Image (cartoon, helix red, strand yellow):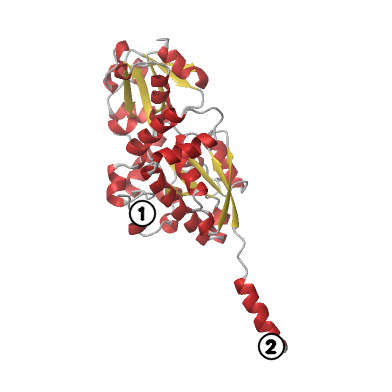
Amino acid sequence: MGLACFGADKACAQAAPRQPIPIQFSFDRPIDAGAAPVLLASASGLFSSEGLAVTTNVASGSPDAIARVASGASDFALADINELIRFRGRPDAPPVKAVFVLFNQSPYAIIARKSRGIHALSDIEGKTLGVADGDLSIRLWPALARQDGIKIAGVKQQGIGAAVREPMLSAGQVDAVTGFSYLSAVNLRDRGVPADDLTVLRFADYGCEAYGFAVIVNPAFGAARPEAVKGFVRALIAGTHLAIKQPERAVDEVISRMDGGSRDLELERLHTLISDNILTGEVRRYGIGAVDPARLDRSIAEVAEDFKFRKRPSAADIFDESFLPPLDGRLIN
């Protein structure tokens, strides 16, 4: 009888549903179209099908999002991989790594007015460049300027508040601003600046090797629950597929999480970031999520032109490919 009861208990235990693994995920900025793959993966049950219960929060920027993951306050975060490179440049930095790259190309750009005489990057000399507080694009400007023969001293930088970046360019108080192509350029068109008067000088078009937003993971969580990390990545890949195939549905999820967002504006943002930052030629050939180690090393060298590493990280310090599915699970048609 004892053996029979033991067998029944074991069968009951096997039949009982497993509790989902709780996941705390940080966005590095307020919700916009860039969050669409994550939000769609959640709304479509892709995380729950992997046995994950994902709760999200919003950090005050990539440094804050990385700090939350490093401390264990969050298990995952979507953060700028170039800020992670700077974070890992400290000899005492926790070994936080990226496990999935969502933006194969960074969104860094200079957005300018053609009516101010700027049609190409070489036209920026002698102009006034508005730089918002905390802007990440400007930190790779020295490397870009050197690569393209631009004299940095010939470009006047004017510090401005992030809230007045687009209004100041729209009003002609500066000739150009640094920012993200899918944010500032779309905002300016929404403010009534004619599209044919805007020049979007994407760093990637002028030789910048930087990757963009990536999913990072707490190292202790990754070591203790590698299958959960793999499941999270699989769900995010599926969510990215859905966002590309069903952008209107993706934007509906984004708008539902925003306070007073414009559906048309976020849809334009999503189309822009998919074509410019996510679905690049490299991704079409080699699949989403991974990095080219040689390219990542070159991007670390670009970061070094404006940042003094106390301990320069390698590509292996920044990215861990072991949680990615095989190539056929990462290809996007």
> On residue 130, which mark appears?
none
Q: Along the line of sight, which residue is nearer the eye, 303 or 107?
A: 107
> On residue 330, which mark appears?
1
Res 212 seen here: no
Q: Along the line of sight, which residue is nearer the eye, 86 or 40?
A: 40
Q: Which residue is mark 2?
A: 3
Q: Along the line of sight, which residue is nearer the eye, 270 or 313?
A: 270
In the image, taking residue 101 as reference, residue 53 lies left or right, namely right
Quadrant occupied by the N terminus: bottom right
Please tell me whether mark 2 sits on a helix, a strand or a loop. Answer: helix
Q: Position of residue 308 (x, y in %)?
A: 46, 35
Q: Earlier in the sequence, mark 2 or mark 1?
A: 2
The residue at the point 50 percent across, 56 percent down is 229
The residue at the point 36 percent across, 33 percent down is 272
Q: Amino acid at mark 2?
A: Leu
Label pair 2/1, CB-CB below 8 angstroms: no
Please tell me whether mark 1 sits on a helix, a strand or a loop. Answer: loop
Q: Amino acid at mark 1?
A: Arg
The residue at the point 37 percent across, 13 percent down is 175
Q: Position of residue 199 (x, y in %)?
A: 31, 21
In the image, taking residue 243 as reference, residue 11 lies left or right, namely right
